[in-house]
Amino acid sequence: MCGRFTQQLSTSEFARIFGAEDIADDPGGHYNLAPTRKAAVVVQRDERRAVVPYRWGFVPTWAKDPRIGSRMINARAETIATSNAFRSAFAKRRCIVPADAFYEWHREGKGPSQPYVIRREDGRTLALAGIWSPWWEPDAPEGAEPLRTFSVVTTAANEILAPIHDRMPVILPEEAWAMWLGAAPADPSELQGLLVPAPAAGLIRFPVARYVSDVRNDGPVLVEPIDPDSAEDSVGA
């Protein structure tokens, strides 16, 4: 799964990377983005590509209560095209979630779960595959702005993730960005073909302090490598 990630860069930098307009206007510096919070995503509407702030936790258009989003932070690649919740968004409303890194937790025996950072070895931005949905209150007046939410698409783990977890987010190569966003034609089989584990080459994994496990914590210390056998009490374990 994918339950936390970082957006350390500003949205203007993400806009430059993805050839988009910066609508979010966020300075970045987010090291512990968690479900139900807003994050920057890249969307394509006709000829316009933009970086916008959407809330993490997918709320289908037919939902009666937006709280369902807290349980729909990930969409499984294997069922995204057939799921009642996700299939319409997969067909029509796809997005990219820029991330400098994401976290995964691993637990052995009865000890505490150990968080790990996964990122590109060269430090470049990861393009996570996402889908998004607009949602309106049942009694919303005509013309009201919807709540826009997103989910991160996940697939089977590659060799980097497999020792600690069996799932990972789909990481899109640059040549697939336009097709995923809808700027280039694609049929469902082509889109489904993108939902595979990313090559392990170029990705790295390392343990970090359990400080990140508390969503109230933030800052660069969260992504600093540690010795997993060392004590972490001094940084909020």
Image (cartoon, rainbow, N blue to C red):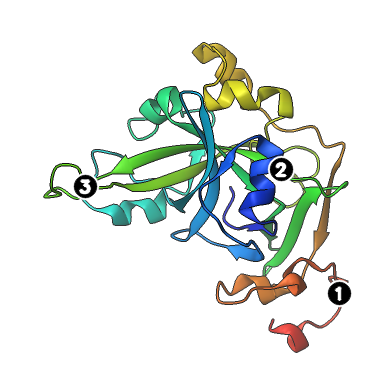
State whether residue 143 appears in this view.
Answer: yes
Q: Residue furthest bottom?
A: 234
Q: Is residue 23 left or right of 226 when viewed as pictured? A: left
Looking at the rendered structure, the secondary structure element under dot 1 is: loop
Mark nearer the N terminus (1 vs 3): 3
Residue bearing mark 1: 229
Residue at figure coordinates x 39%, y 33% from the top left? 86
Q: Secondary structure at mark 3?
A: loop
- How far across and down, in percent of the image, does residue 152 sit? 54, 43
**Crowd tier of the residue under label 2, counting other residues whose Cα lies within 10 Å: few below 14, some 14–19, many 20 or above:** many
Q: Residue 19, relative to residue 113: is it above or below?
A: above
Question: Which one is closest to the eye, mark 1 or mark 3?
Answer: 3
Q: At which x and y percent is residue 3?
A: 57, 55
Amino acid type, residue under disc 2 in the picture:
Leu
Q: Is residue 37 left or right of residue 221?
A: left
Residue 172 placed where, x, y %? 67, 31
Q: Which disc number belongs to residue 126?
A: 2
Q: Nearer the viewer, mark 2 or mark 3?
A: 3
Q: Which numbered disc flags the more N-terminal residue, 2 or 1?
A: 2
Comparing marks 2 and 1, which lies closer to the viewer? 2
Instruction: Judge left or right: residue 74 versus residue 123.
Output: left
The residue wearing badge 3 is 144
Q: Earlier in the sequence, mark 2 or mark 3?
A: 2
Callouts 2 and 1 close, C-beta under 8 Å: no
Residue 173 percent coordinates (x, y): 72, 29
